[in-house]
Image: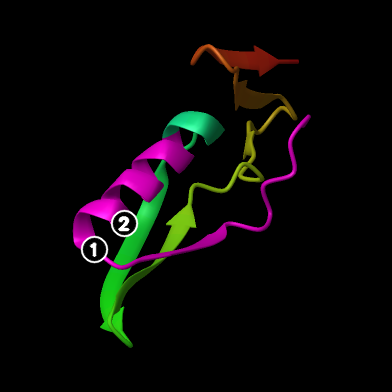
Amino acid sequence: MKENNSHNVKYFENSTMYGLYQDMDKWQKDSNKRFLSSTVQKDGGKYCCICLTNPSEVVIVGSNGSWAEVTRDGQLRVTN
């Protein structure tokens, strides 16, 4: 795998909920990644969010030893 995505926790904070949304939306567009889950709480007058991203280290392996990966363009590739 070309990318190491084993650190899949992200933190965002902003003084407004809309600002928090904009920060998270920008990160997703810039990183080309999706959030697996997120939690938003208000802390000290700011909106704070902890997100988990989809890990890339999940490997699909067949009984014959073949494995699969999703390419950057969204295609599923299976090797022998």
Quarter of the figure with residue 48: bottom left
Is residue 75 a member of the stretch shown in magenta?
Answer: no
* 28 relative to 37, above or below: above
Q: Amino acid at mark 1?
A: Thr
Q: Quickly name the residue at label 2.
A: 20
What kind of residue is marked 2? Leu
Q: Name which residue lies at 28% across and 50% down.
A: 21
Of 48 and 10, the residue lying toward us: 48
Magenta range: 1-28
Return the residue at label 1.
16
Check if residue 25 falls in the magenta segment.
yes
Where disc 2 sits, the SS reads helix
Label 2 vs label 1, nearer the camera: 1
On screen, residue 49 versus residue 2, left or right, reads left
**Residue 32 can be seen, yes or no:** no
Whether tag 2 and tag 1 are in contact, CB under 8 A, the answer is yes
User: Compared with residue 34, is residue 14 higher up or lower down, i.e. above or below?
Assistant: below
Q: Which one is in front, 60 or 17? A: 17
